[in-house]
Amino acid sequence: MNLFLKDKIAIVGGASMGIGLGIARILAEEGARVAITARREPALIEAANALREKTGAEILPVQADCRRAEDCERVVETVAREFGGIDILVNNDGAPPLGELTSFDDAAWGKAVEQNLMYVVRMARAAVPHMEARGGGILNIAAISAIQPIAGFGLSVATWGGVIGYAKTLSLELARRNINVNTICPGYIETQRLEKVFAAGGQDPEKIRAELTEEVPMGRIGTVDDIASIVALLVSPRGRYITGTTIQVDGGLLRGLR
Ligand SMILES: NC(=O)c1ccc[n+]([C@@H]2O[C@H](COP(=O)([O-])OP(=O)(O)OC[C@H]3O[C@@H](n4cnc5c(N)ncnc54)[C@H](OP(=O)(O)O)[C@@H]3O)[C@@H](O)[C@H]2O)c1
């Protein structure tokens, strides 16, 4: 199926590795021009070079910390200037620290709100004026824990709850401008971050991996391609009628009927 992504202009956050890199790769393979961001510039440049080599696509690395308002604005302005517009915005990054909710002070809460919620608010606010004449897609990466909370993940659960409410409302406001807004909630996906989660409890990471894999009805940890494929559809003209949704991509892990 042709997703009609050729020459579309995309911004993919947190894309020097992991889920963001997988999304950037699939969009580039489909012919999009892709700007990627991350904090650590050497890894970002390396990822951009590898993407160019693999896909032949135009790739623009823009170093940025998504928790900083000025970085969000600079990313959007740089892409609009260098590429001449914006069609696709994928909000993805790292995540706040794990730990018991009552152990975090106001400063930690402030950082979590900046990273998960205000990042999405600022990127959409800056990008929409560049998108509205052309139509387009906005896609947020959250986590299954935002709809099926996990103890210890509370900073993310609480702030992504805000993202889901924000995205649904934004989808209503942008629908007549032919811009869709959706949120993907991954289950367990094979990335460096998941390795850290396996190791976080101080137990044998391989034992935790085996236990969590067993929990997944499909019996395997997901791949970044499992996420990237649906993201490519949702942000493409083919997926434009799908808006305001929160979709889990988790091998059947979510136990609710929602
Ligand atoms: N992997 C999973 O199983 C899983 C499951 C559910 C949800 N998720 C969520 O999906 C997102 C991506 O996860 P992942 O597993 O792909 O993580 P990852 O492998 O650690 O990659 C994170 C990417 O985001 C960048 N990043 C981190 N903090 C940033 C910041 N403040 N500003 C800009 N870029 C930043 C990182 O580069 P720098 O460090 O250089 O900035 C890196 O490129 C996270 O929000 C995670 O919670 C992951």
Image: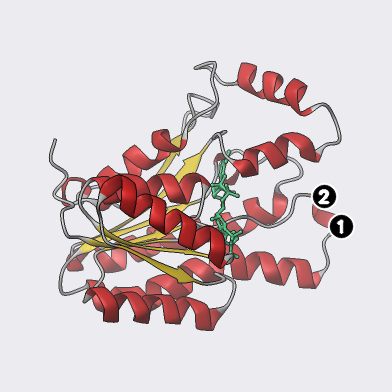
- The local secondary structure at tag 2 comes to loop
Q: Is mark 1 within 8 Å of ligand 1?
A: no
Q: Which residue is mark 2?
A: 100
- Residue type, mark 2 in image: Glu
Is 209 left or right of 83, judged from the image as shown? right
- Asked whether residue 15 is in view, the answer is no
Q: Quadrant of residue 180?
A: bottom left
Q: Quadrant of residue 123?
A: bottom left
Is 108 left or right of 4, judged from the image as shown? right
245, above or below 194, in the image: below
**Cα distance, mark 1 to mark 2?**
5 Å
- Residue at 42% x, 44% y: name it: 22
Image coordinates for residue 134, horizontal then vertical, percent: 15, 69
Image coordinates for residue 135, horizontal then vertical, percent: 18, 65
Image coordinates for residue 209, horizontal then vertical, percent: 69, 25
Is 155 left or right of 170, judged from the image as shown? right
Q: Which residue is mark 1?
A: 103
- Residue at 80% x, 50% y: name it: 99
Contact check, label 1 and label 2, Cβ < 8 Å: yes
Residues 234 and 163: in front is 234
69, above or below 176, in the image: below
Image coordinates for residue 19, horizontal then vertical, percent: 48, 45
